[in-house]
């Protein structure tokens, strides 16, 4: 006899999101342990950790009504993942970024700001993939990204990401809050975000700070 976990499409989507959240927490726990045991190098750890944190923030935001407490979610499903909860919920940035920020708190290029930019890029791209294309959903994400990019003095005023985000924000400001991007506009924005993200990563100093 087949047992269904859901009764409709909405419930099915909820359980699929639960499964994804579970997977992100478990993957983060494994990554943290691998980093502590020196099984993975700092560069690879930071890249993967940034992605997991950004995906987590996007998913946690979408599930805020059904999963108000990540700690309670972990307890409910008997997930013994203290390192992941600390990294995803408490810290919000990779251990490498924490270490660099504390070692060079007054540095011109802030590691925390670099982390913020990366997370804003990935969150914006993830949101488009989740079909969050209404102006009042997209505009705040691009505004946050633009603000974080402007904090970094290593990026010139004409940096691709800055100019493209200004153009998109200006375009969205002329639309109504409930208006939605067309499929073509959504694809173009995602392309611009991806291109700007690659340019951003290439512009960072080789030391990663």
Image (cartoon, rainbow, N blue to C red):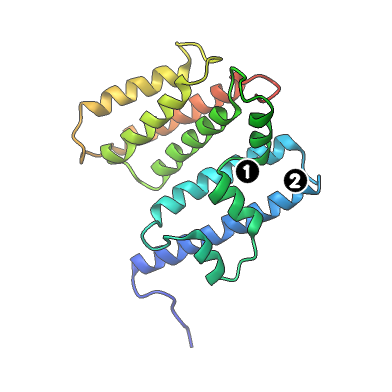
Are the two marked residues, 2 and 1, in contact with CB atoms closer than 8 angstroms? yes
Residue at the disc numbered 1 = 49
Q: Quadrant of residue 137?
A: top left
Tell me which label, 2 or 1, sits earlier in the chain.
2
Taking the spot 40% from the left edge, 74% from the top edge, the residue there is 6
Sort mark 1 into few (<14), some (14-19) or many (20+) by Cα contacts within 10 Å: many
Q: Secondary structure at mark 1?
A: helix
Residue 24 vs residue 185: left or right? right
Q: Quadrant of residue 144?
A: top left
Kindly give the residue lying farthest to the left in the view shown.
176
Check the image and report above or below for 140 versus 25: above
Residue at image location 43% in from the left, 79% down from the top: 4
**Which part of the image, by quadrant, shows the C terminus?**
top right
Judging depth in this view, the residue of 196 and 205 nearest the camera is 205
Residue 77 image point, x, y percent: 56, 70
Q: Is residue 199 left or right of residue 134?
A: right
Q: Position of residue 187 (x, y in %)?
A: 39, 35
Which residue is rendered at x = 64% and y = 60% of the image? Answer: 81
The quadrant where residue 162 appears: top left
Q: Is 107 on the left-hand or right-hand side of 35?
A: left
Vertical comparison of 7 with 23: above or below: below
> Disc 2 marks which residue?
35
């Amino acid at each position: 006899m087949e047992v269904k976990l859901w009764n409709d499409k909405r419930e099915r989507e909820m359980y699929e999101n639960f499964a994804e959240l579970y997977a992100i927490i478990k993957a983060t726990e494994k990554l943290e342990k691998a980093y502590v045991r020196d099984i993975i190098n700092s560069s690879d750890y930071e890249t993967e950790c940034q992605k997991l944190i950004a995906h987590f923030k996007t998913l946690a935001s979408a599930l805020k009504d059904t999963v108000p407490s990540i700690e309670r979610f972990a307890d409910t499903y008997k997930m013994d993942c203290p390192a992941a909860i600390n990294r995803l919920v408490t810290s919000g940035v990779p251990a490498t970024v924490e270490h660099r920020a504390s070692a060079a708190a007054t540095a011109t290029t802030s590691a925390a700001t670099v982390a913020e930019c990366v997370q804003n890029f990935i969150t914006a791209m993830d949101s488009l993939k989740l079909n969050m294309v209404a102006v009042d959903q997209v505009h705040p994400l691009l505004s946050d990204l633009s603000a974080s990019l402007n904090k970094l003095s290593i990026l010139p005023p004409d940096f691709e990401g800055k100019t493209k985000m200004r153009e998109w924000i200006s375009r969205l400001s002329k639309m109504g809050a409930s208006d939605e991007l067309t499929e073509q506009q959504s694809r173009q924005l995602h392309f611009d975000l991806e291109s700007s993200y690659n340019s951003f990563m290439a512009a960072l100093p080789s030391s990663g700070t």
